[in-house]
Image (cartoon, rainbow, N blue to C red):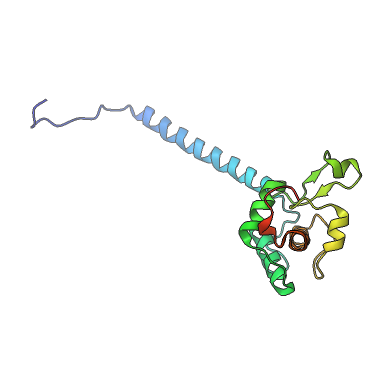
Amino acid sequence: MSAAAKHRRPRNNRLVRALTAAGTGAVVLTLSLIGATSASAATGTTSKASSTTAGYPNNLDGWIRESLAIMAQKGIPGTYNGIYRNTIRESSGNPKAINLWDSNAVKGTPSKGLLQVIDPTFNAYHVAGTSFDPYDPVANITAACNYAAARYGSIDNVFSAY
């Protein structure tokens, strides 16, 4: 091809272009719907409110931040990253998670909630001002961090089941 010649795009049929555009839109719409469904199912929120009574987002980020605020008031050590890492490992961020197969479950005290705390531990390390429900995300995180502080110095020092 000579330097003076211009490259020409092949002409597409108008119908082909319209179908391509429609197909792309359908894929985007489908992916958006799948993502929205997955996201709402994965959060495991227990209420329809978009924020907690303390004004934090009603999701894993908000629960951790609210727990950290309570922990700071009570002198319980821990960081966002330490809580997040352990929460993802223990429950994948599902506040309704329950372990029905390990040695605790066999003994009749299954691990529950975001940080998989058994009832006796939850009751012993419950932090005043939080719910007495081990499935309550903020209560579960705060009690687990209180336990981890007593046993390991901080939730930040926990890198496996505890």
Residue extending farthest right: 108
Residue toward you, 90 or 11: 90
Residue 70 image position (x, y, % from top left): 72, 70
Residue 111 image position (x, y, % from top left): 82, 48
Q: Quadrant of residue 24?
A: top left
Residue extending farthest bottom: 73
- Is residue 73 visible in the rendered image? The answer is yes
- Is residue 59 visible in the rendered image? The answer is no
Figure check: 161 above or below 75:
above
**Which corner quadrant holds the N terminus?**
top left
Q: What residue sits 87% from the left and 60% below the top?
A: 123
Would residue 125 appear left or right of 154 to someone viewing this image? right
Figure check: 123 above or below 88:
below
Q: Quadrant of residue 56?
A: bottom right
Residue 61 image position (x, y, % from top left): 63, 58
Residue toward you, 75 or 34: 75
Q: What residue sits 75% from the left and 57% below the top?
A: 137
Q: How many marks?
A: 0
Residue toward you, 28 or 109: 109
Residue extending farthest front: 152
Would residue 5 appear left or right of 145 to someone viewing this image? left
Residue toward you, 107 or 61: 107
Residue 139 image position (x, y, % from top left): 78, 61
Would residue 12 appear left or right of 27 to someone viewing this image? left
Q: What residue sits 67% from the left and 57% below the top?
A: 157
